[in-house]
């Protein structure tokens, strides 16, 4: 059939360009080591930055939550799926990560859905969304779905953004940025962005998928920079440092009330199982109280960067658990990732369209679950592999 043949050709083209993505079935819980194909691999691929995805207290809360609430929510939040567990989690998140006095929070099934909700609720035709060029795909998708003008500014370039804001005659303006860039690990210049948002009366949407739980003593990137504003709309994900699933938006109560009424990815979807809210309440308590995890993570990041200092491979400048090593060509990134796999390390190769063409990379992620010898061993393996792969890149 021609329809199938077209798909086959498309997939073959993808493979030839080194862009085919494959899934691996993991046979163990997340952790510093995971089992794949019967092998134990040191896991440098996960966003479980604090090692909470398999924490006994989080597991116990999920188990108790299942006993208390059953397995499923049964319906959307606005029908009969909103439970006291969801409400308790939202209250805790608002108090912990709210970007202004009196902030409220709203939970979503995922960060992807939360970003679609924010951008479509706060911008529409005749408005303009200003977005960092390296933002995550779901901020871009939300911007496109909103039908607002979509203006992308060069990565972190406040001067360029100012010019674009000055030139805009949009009714409402919204600046959207990753707080920690997911494939680069660097931080957005949030203080400068907030100053521009103030000057041009714009919303500032902060996607803190990779900062929540890690930065700002766990409160996230807005707290890290000591910022507070009614114009900040903060999105945090709960499947990364928090170790479970879902996401939240924390913002002024009018923003939250608007999302409840209008956000299609909130209104027209089944609520997450309440047992996950119970697990997240346990995880949030650990994020708040177990500061040693963040200290351990910071020490591992410093140690890894130190071990990599004299290598031909250069890490991007990042102080976060995301430590990218840019390789360049797709095939070279895949080869390096495969060579590490052979040596017992799981480090994913990230290729376009996730990153710009020609900047394929290893996305090395560190976790409080790792031990110092894990990062030493990875650095040693990279040192061993660097010359051979670098030569391959020159051909
Ligand atoms: C910056 C950023 N925003 C949003 C998301 C989406 O979050 P979720 O996985 O909860 O859908 C991700 C990653 O998945 C991300 O890296």
Image (cartoon, grey):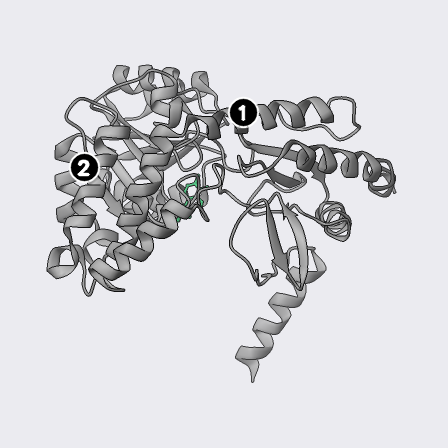
From the image, tell me which residue sits under label 1: 298
| Of callouts 1 and 2, the N-terminal one | 2
> Helix, strand or loop at disc 1?
helix
Depth check: give the residue in front, 366 or 146: 366
The quadrant where ligand 1 appears is top left
Q: Residue at x 12, y 48 (%)?
A: 261
Task: Give x and y (percent) for residue 327.
Answer: 72, 38
Disc 2 residue: CB within 8 Å of ligand 1? no
Q: Note whether residue 144 is visible.
A: yes
Image quarter where the N terminus lies is bottom right
Q: Note whether residue 170 is visible.
A: no
Residue at the far bottom in the pictured view: 1
Task: Give x and y (percent) for residue 225.
Answer: 38, 17
Task: Give x and y (percent) for residue 394.
Answer: 86, 38
**Residue 207, quarter of the rendered image:** top left
**Residue 194, quarter of the rendered image:** top left
Disc 1 residue: CB within 8 Å of ligand 1? no
Depth check: give the residue in front, 340 or 145: 340
Depth check: give the residue in front, 47 or 29: 29
From the image, tell me which residue sits under label 2: 91
**Image height of 155 relative to 261, above or below:** above
Is 31 placed left or right of 340 in the picture? left
Q: Residues within 10 Å of mark 1 (few under 14, many from 20)?
A: some
**Image height of 240 relative to 163, above or below:** below
């Amino acid at each position: 059939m021609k329809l199938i043949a077209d798909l086959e050709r498309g997939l073959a083209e993808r493979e030839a360009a080194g862009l085919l993505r494959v899934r691996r079935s993991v046979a163990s819980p997340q952790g510093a080591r995971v089992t794949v194909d019967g092998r134990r691999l040191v896991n440098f691929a996960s966003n479980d930055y604090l090692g909470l995805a398999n924490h006994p207290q989080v597991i116990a809360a999920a188990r108790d939550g299942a006993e208390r609430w059953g397995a499923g929510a049964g319906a959307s939040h606005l029908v009969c799926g909103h439970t006291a567990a969801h409400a308790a989690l939202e209250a805790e998140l608002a108090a912990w990560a709210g970007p202004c006095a009196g902030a409220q929070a709203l939970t979503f099934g995922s960060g992807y859905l939360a970003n679609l909700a924010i951008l479509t609720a706060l911008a529409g035709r005749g408005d303009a969304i200003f977005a960092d060029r390296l933002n995550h795909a779901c901020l871009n998708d939300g911007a496109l779905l909103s039908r607002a003008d979509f203006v992308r500014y060069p990565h972190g370039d406040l001067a360029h953004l100012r010019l674009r804001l000055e030139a805009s005659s949009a009714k409402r303006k919204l600046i959207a940025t990753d707080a920690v860039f997911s494939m680069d690990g660097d931080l957005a210049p949030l203080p400068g962005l907030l100053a521009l948002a103030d000057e041009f009366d714009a919303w500032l949407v902060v996607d803190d998928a990779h900062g929540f739980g890690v930065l700002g003593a766990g409160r996230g990137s807005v707290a890290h920079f000591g910022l507070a504003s009614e114009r900040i709309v903060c999105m945090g994900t709960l499947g990364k440092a928090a170790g479970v699933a879902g996401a939240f938006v924390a913002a002024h109560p009018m923003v939250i009330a608007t999302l409840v009424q209008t956000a299609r990815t909130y209104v027209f979807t089944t609520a997450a199982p309440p047992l996950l809210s119970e697990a997240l309440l346990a995880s949030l308590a650990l994020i708040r109280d177990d500061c040693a995890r963040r200290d351990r993570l910071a020490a591992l990041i410093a140690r890894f960067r130190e071990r990599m200092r004299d290598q031909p491979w250069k890490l991007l400048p990042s102080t976060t658990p995301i430590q990218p090593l840019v390789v360049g060509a797709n095939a070279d990134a895949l080869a390096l990732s495969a060579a590490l796999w052979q040596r017992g390390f799981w480090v994913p190769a990230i290729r376009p369209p996730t990153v710009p063409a020609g900047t394929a990379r290893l996305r090395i992620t560190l976790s409080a679950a790792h031990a110092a010898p894990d990062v030493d061993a990875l650095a040693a393996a990279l040192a061993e592999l660097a010359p051979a792969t670098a030569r391959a890149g020159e051909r």
